[in-house]
Image: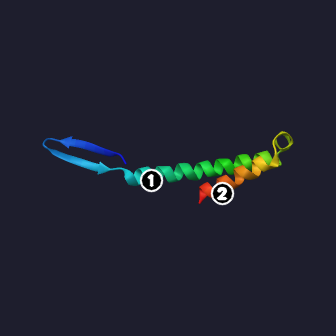
Amino acid sequence: MSTVVCQKGKDEQVISTSSTDKSVRKLFTYQTGQALIVLGTLFKHIPPFSESIDKNTGNTLISLGRKLKK
């Protein structure tokens, strides 16, 4: 948890940014999940990738991406 302290004369204002941290973390996790699903689908179905990369790798990336998007 981070806090920001702004000084105005003798008074101090403390602003908590924990809710902002949570929303940024949630957005990052969601987008990472989307990227993993796209990579897994690409590895699984696009011929240049599907020939050189095992299908289990694509399946694993897709399942990890789905877990992160929840």
Q: Mark on residue 66? A: 2
Residue in view at x 81 percent, y 49 percent: 55
Name the side, left or right, on which 68 lies relative to 51.
Answer: left
Position of residue 11 measured from the top left corner of the image (x, y, whole percent): 15, 46
Position of residue 22 measured from the top left corner of the image (x, y, whole percent): 45, 53
Residue in view at x 37 percent, y 48 percent: 1
- Do the residues bearing badges 2 and 1 touch, measured as CB atoms within 8 Å? no
Name the side, left or right, on which 43 lies relative to 8.
Answer: right
Q: Mark on residue 13? A: none
* Secondary structure of residue under mark 2: helix
Position of residue 56 measured from the top left corner of the image (x, y, whole percent): 79, 50
Residue in view at x 76 percent, y 49 percent: 58
* Secondary structure of residue under mark 1: helix
Coloring applied to the structure: rainbow
- Kind of residue sitting beneath label 2: Arg
Placement of the C terminus among the 4 image quadrants? bottom right
Q: Nearer the viewer, residue 44 or 8?
A: 44
Residue in view at x 65 percent, y 53 percent: 65
Q: Earlier in the sequence, mark 2 or mark 1?
A: 1
- Kind of residue sitting beneath label 1: Lys
Q: Nearer the viewer, residue 35 or 64?
A: 64
Q: CA distance from mark 2 to mark 1?
A: 19 Å
Q: Quadrant of residue 66?
A: bottom right
**Few, some or many residues within 10 Å of mark 1 (<14, 14–19, 20+):** few
- Residue at the disc numbered 1: 22
Furthest residue in direction bottom, as rendered = 70
**Few, some or many residues within 10 Å of mark 2 (<14, 14–19, 20+):** some
Position of residue 63 measured from the top left corner of the image (x, y, whole percent): 69, 55
